[in-house]
Image (cartoon, rainbow, N blue to C red):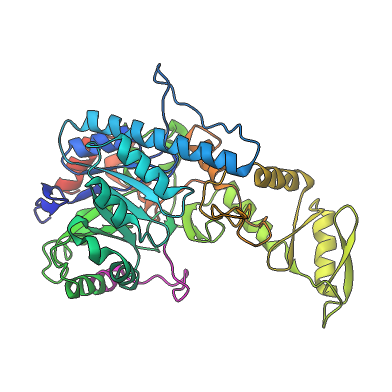
Amino acid sequence: MKAINTIRMGGVDVLPLVEGGKGVAVSNGRTCGAWASAGGVGTFSAVNADSYDPDGSIIRQIYHGKTRRDRHEELVEYGIMGGIAQAQRAWDMAGGKGRIHANILWEMGGAERVARGMLEGARGLIHGVTCGAGMPYKLAEVARDYGVHYYPIISSARAFAALWKRAYHKTSEWLGGVVYEDPWLAGGHNGLSNSENPKVPEAPFPRVLKLRQQMREFGLGDVPIIMAGGVWWLEEWEDWIDNPDLGPIAFQFGTRPLLTQESPISDAWKQRLLTLKSGDVLLQPFSPTGFYSSAVRNEFLRELEDRNERQVAYTAEPVGEHMAEYGVGPRKRPVFVTPHDLARIAHWEAEGFTEAMRTPDNTLIFVTPEKSREIVKDQVDCMGCLSACRFSNWSQHEPDFDNGRRADPRSFCIQKTLQDVSHDGALEKNLMFAGHNAYRFGSDPFYSNGFIPGAKQLVERILTGR
């Protein structure tokens, strides 16, 4: 394997190995600090990050506000406190080595407020902010105001060009790197555009080459590109290393740090990772963000798949083939479906899926009464964890604080399930984000006999190859 040399990133020389930030309470100060202490770039998630009481116990994020707006304010306060707490833990563990980055989602509720509050309260502890899940135009402005570097997460040269031309060209001195997150390989939320087919993956090299060519047109030839998604052994990427066409390249590891001693996920989750097979990670469209995302195909995702299959179109009046009357809800308000769909509905009802729920697209889905009550409760309990949520119809923008559409029962409360799974909730009943290479844990000899390395051991292994 080629020698792995340091590169210049964020004004210092670091190993070109980046820990990917992962969701609610999964990448935390401990994982970040351990990775940074090995000389790389550690990343903690500032998405509803955990904070701690004086005894060091996690403060569970319980909401008391009577309205969504009140609960949203609580969520922002939790986010700021948690971000500061994780930054301090990462700084203490890193011992002055490597770099410490915070990861936020631009589409999370109160993203700019959380970022500013965290950076204000953790001045000097955070070196960079990575940000994706949307078009974070204001990221550069936030980073400049607090003297940290920014790292936008994009999935195409076109997306970066839009960010650069609208905002980033004004603060180029604070651009530390550009994260290319492959939409077909990376875990979590992915940046597939409407012109890209989720079922037809494209090779990353031509897409990253196009990104570098675009960056060179903007005078950014020396700004590192961080390849995220599908990276396991670096010898599999040797044609990228020291490649003059690509320029400086770093590699992001999101899935592999899940299986480390510092990782806060449960032992059951870690053991589950060792059993995954190829194809067990699903690129699916159910997220309330509206983005595709990659996660382990467990009971949680299978229920969503089935829920969306039990779906028929309806009209308010008899139109065309929609001539069969069907009564919806306790008052049996009439809608009209096709005779074929009426027969399907009768079959679903015979199986216990007796509750019809309306979607924003003039369709009905059919669920059990228990699932219907759960969906409605989760929608009512919304705390505004996203800037806009298709599941609950929340929007953080005044004056109405809704997205103008009917709440969509085909999705789910992402805050509820990610908080649950990250704090030892049932693995089969919750969303488990993972990259598509997660199945390699089971076949990689590094993890034989159930071995779980420390973060430093993992970095050393990556540097020395197989």
Majority secondary structure in the magenta region: loop
**Count of marks overlaid on the render:** 0
Q: Is residue 1 magenta?
A: no
Locate residue 122 relative to residue 462 in the image: left or right.
right
- State the residue lying farthest toward the bottom: 320
Q: In the rendered image of this protein, does residue 410 appear above or below residue 324?
A: above
Image quarter hosting the N terminus: bottom left
Q: In the rendered image of this protein, does residue 106 appear above or below residue 31?
A: below
Q: In the rendered image of this protein, does residue 155 appear above or below residue 87?
A: below
Q: Quadrant of residue 174?
A: bottom left
Q: Quadrant of residue 359?
A: bottom right
Percent of width and height locating residue 332 = 90, 58
Q: Which residue sits at x=20%, y=46%?
A: 462
| Closer-to-camera residue (257/145) | 145
Percent of width and height locating residue 390 = 60, 57
Q: Which residue sits at x=83%, y=56%?
A: 349
Q: In the rendered image of this protein, does residue 430 appear above or below residue 358?
A: above
Percent of width and height locating residue 320 = 82, 83
- State the residue lying farthest toward the top: 55
Highlighted magenta segment, given as a residue range: 191-209
Q: Is residue 200 magenta?
A: yes
Q: Which residue sits at x=35%, y=65%?
A: 155
Q: Which residue sits at x=66%, y=47%?
A: 379
Percent of width and height locating residue 329 = 85, 55
